[in-house]
Amino acid sequence: MEEEKSPFISTGFIDLDNKIGGLESEGITVVGACPAMGKTAWLMSLIRYYIQEKTNQQNQKIKPIFIFSLEMDAQSLMMRIISILFDVSFIDIKNKYIDENDYSKITNAVNLLIRFKCANNQNALIIDDAHFTPAILRRKLQR
């Protein structure tokens, strides 16, 4: 109670943080719902907020990001992260309809991801194998 800083990680969604206090920094958060309900979009918003907040703070311990997806492949997830980081249409990136302004935004997004990687000395890990088991999940998290 006397700690200055909350042990929870803000989601960037004020109303949600007020209800749940944020995400537990030492826990695993599982997001589940029916297909096409916005799970990936919500996750990408969380990642955007976390990356932007942490890369703008000096001397801040940055925890790695692990994404396990049963629905989307790693390349699509990375395109979504880049899309949401700098507000470039995911469909335009996917279909390669990128103008010079979008290209500049994508370059900025990639540079931000590189700064994030350098700040925590590891990549964000994306596992897109629909056949992984809880035992595989545990091994990957431990490694």
Image (cartoon, rainbow, N blue to C red):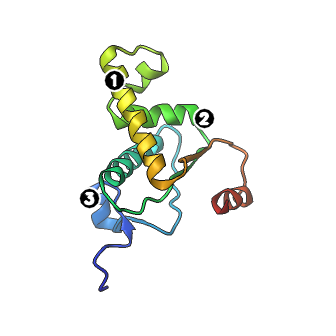
Q: CA distance from mark 2 to mark 3?
A: 30 Å
The residue indicated by pointer 1 is 104
Of the 4 image quadrants, the one containing the N terminus is bottom left
Confirm or deny contact between disc 2 and disc 1 (CB under 8 A). Answer: no
Q: Amino acid at mark 2?
A: Asp
Q: CA distance from mark 1 to mark 3?
A: 33 Å
Give the SS element for disc 1.
helix
**Mark identifier at residue 15:** 3
Give the SS element for disc 3.
helix
The residue indicated by pointer 2 is 73
User: Callout 1: few (<14), some (14-19), or many (20+) C-alpha neighbours within 10 Å?
Assistant: few
Confirm or deny contact between disc 1 and disc 3 (CB under 8 A). Answer: no
Q: Amino acid at mark 3?
A: Asp
**Above or below, comparing residue 66 to residue 37 in the picture:** below
Q: Which quadrant of the view contains residue 4?
A: bottom left
Point out the frontmost of discs 2 and 1.
1
Q: Amino acid at mark 1?
A: Ser
Q: CA distance from mark 2 to mark 1?
A: 25 Å
In front: 104, or 137?
Answer: 104
In front: 22, or 25?
Answer: 25
Q: Is residue 37 left or right of residue 45?
A: right
Point out the frontmost of discs 1 and 3.
1
What residue lies at 42% left-to-right and 26% top-to-bottom? 90
Could you say where residue 31 lies in the image, as x and y percent from the top left? Answer: 50, 54
In front: 78, or 109?
Answer: 109
Q: Is tag 2's residue or tag 3's residue first in the polypeptide sequence?
A: 3
**Above or below, comparing residue 23 to residue 3 in the picture:** above
